[in-house]
């Protein structure tokens, strides 16, 4: 058990072997498998875990603890890596100097599309649907 406790606090590399809606299972270098809970992937709110990790991804994790069943609990957000931070795959392609502007503009586009859909639905409910002229 002393050897197992020596893993706690270590930063190790591993491969994602399974992705679920509550987290990702990672097979470590020493062939042990641990769980990175969805709350330990990133400091951001995560609605779709597959935006952050995919099956077969190589990741770096920190061993946080070992639960009562003897399984490892891992964290990706506690790993401080400057060259490869944990970010959504869609956002990682954004320019780093305009990250806020990129996020804001994408939010505005999504909000406008939702607003248009809501207006259309409201008009349909009220019976104010314009019929297109046939030519």
Image (cartoon, rainbow, N blue to C red):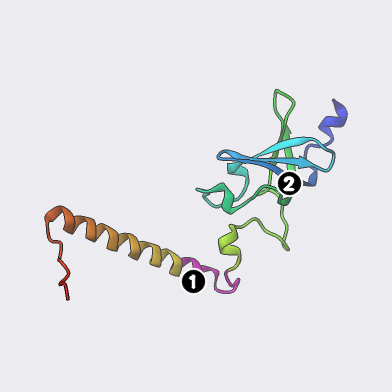
Q: Report the Cα–Cα distance between label 2 and label 1.
A: 30 Å
What residue is rendered at 73% in x and 46% in y? 61
26 lies left or right of 88: right
Asked if the residue at tag 1 contacts the one at tag 2, i.e. Cβ–Cβ closer than 8 Å, the answer is: no
Question: Residue, x 33% and y 59% (percent of image)?
Answer: 114
Give the quarter of the image for residue 98: bottom right
Q: Say whether residue 66 is left or right of residue 49.
A: right
Instruction: Check disc 1 and report its element: helix, strand or loop.
Output: helix
Residue at the limit of the structure toward the top, as seen here: 68
Given residues 88 and 2, the one toward you in this image is 88
| Magenta stretch in the rendered image | 94-104
Numbered-mark total = 2
Please identify the quadrant where the N terminus is shown: top right
Q: Secondary structure at mark 2?
A: strand
Residue at the image point whose x is 15% and y is 66% from the top: 131
Q: Earlier in the sequence, mark 2 or mark 1?
A: 2
Tag of residue 36: none
Q: Quadrant of residue 68?
A: top right
Q: Residue at x 22, y 56 (%)?
A: 121
Q: Nearer the viewer, residue 100 or 110?
A: 110
Outermost residue toward the right? 3
Residue 85 x, y percent position in the rendering = 67, 58
- Residue designated by label 2: 61
In the rendered image, residue 32, in percent from the top left (x then y), is placed at: 79, 35
Task: Determine crowd level at label 2: few under 14, some 14-19, many 20+ residues with C-alpha closer than 10 A.
Answer: many
Query: Does 135 sit left or right of 77 as displayed?
Result: left
- Spot the residue most to the front: 135
Figure quadrant of the C terminus? bottom left
Verify whether residue 100 appears in magenta: yes
Q: Which residue is mark 1?
A: 101
The residue furthest bottom is 135
């Amino acid at each position: 058990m002393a050897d197992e406790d020596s893993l706690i606090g270590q930063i190790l590399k591993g491969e994602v072997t399974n992705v679920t809606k509550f987290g990702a299972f990672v097979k470590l270098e020493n062939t042990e498998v641990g769980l990175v809970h969805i709350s330990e992937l990133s400091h951001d709110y995560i609605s779709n875990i597959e935006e952050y990790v995919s099956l077969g991804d190589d990741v770096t994790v920190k061993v946080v603890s070992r639960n009562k069943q003897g399984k490892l609990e891992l964290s990706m957000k506690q790993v401080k890596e400057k060259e490869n931070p944990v970010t959504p795959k869609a956002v990682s392609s954004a320019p780093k100097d305009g990250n806020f502007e990129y996020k804001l503009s994408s939010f505005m586009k999504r909000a406008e599309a939702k607003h248009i859909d809501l207006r259309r639905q409201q008009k349909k409910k009220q019976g104010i649907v314009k019929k297109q002229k046939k030519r």
